[in-house]
């Protein structure tokens, strides 16, 4: 489940970067994107932060999570490429 959560967080990070939202100006809007992720998976931000802290002590497990995220993102990219053709 953490793989899905982290993937969604990173996709949201990318989306917000593309939208050029600024934390100082758009904090509530930005926060709502992340709250939607937490709600989708039934976790609080504190629980996600705690999990990330836990996994930081186990880099091999965190590497496995990010390896899976990269595989998932590559599949998404392939799907988008095929759709464009």
Image (cartoon, rainbow, N blue to C red):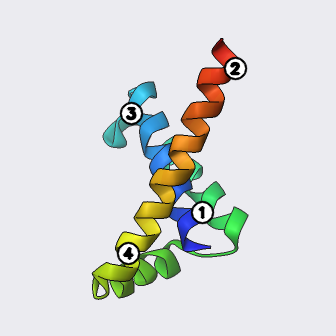
Query: What is the distance, in whole Å, between disc 3 and disc 2 at their CAs?
Result: 24 Å
Q: Nearer the viewer, mark 3 or mark 2?
A: 2
Q: Earlier in the sequence, mark 3 or mark 2?
A: 3
Mark 2, residue position: 83
Nearest the viewer among 45 and 85 is 85
Mark 4, residue position: 62
Circle 1: element type? helix
- Density class for disc 4 (Cα within 10 Å; few <14, some 14-19, many ≥20) is some
In the rendered image of this protein, does residue 4 appear above or below residue 30?
Answer: below
Query: What is the distance, in whole Å, between disc 1 and disc 2 at their CAs?
Result: 23 Å
Mark 1, residue position: 4
Q: Earlier in the sequence, mark 4 or mark 1?
A: 1
Q: Are marks 1 and 2 in contact (CB under 8 Å)?
A: no
Q: Earlier in the sequence, mark 4 or mark 3?
A: 3
In the rendered image of this protein, does residue 53 appear above or below residue 20?
Answer: below
- Name the spot of residue 11 as percent of width and height, x first: 50, 45
Q: Are marks 4 and 2 in contact (CB under 8 Å)?
A: no
Circle 4: element type? helix
Q: Residue at x 71, y 63 (%)?
A: 40
- Density class for disc 1 (Cα within 10 Å; few <14, some 14-19, many ≥20) is some
Give the number of the disc on residue 17.
Answer: 3
């Amino acid at each position: 489940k953490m793989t899905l959560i982290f993937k969604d967080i990173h996709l949201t990070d990318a989306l917000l970067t593309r939208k050029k939202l600024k934390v100082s100006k758009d904090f509530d809007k930005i926060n709502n994107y992340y709250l939607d992720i937490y709600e989708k998976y039934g976790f609080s931000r504190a629980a996600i932060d705690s999990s990330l802290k836990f996994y930081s002590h186990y880099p091999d497990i965190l590497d496995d999570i990010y390896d899976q995220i990269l595989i998932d993102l590559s599949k998404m990219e392939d799907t988008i490429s095929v759709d464009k053709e």
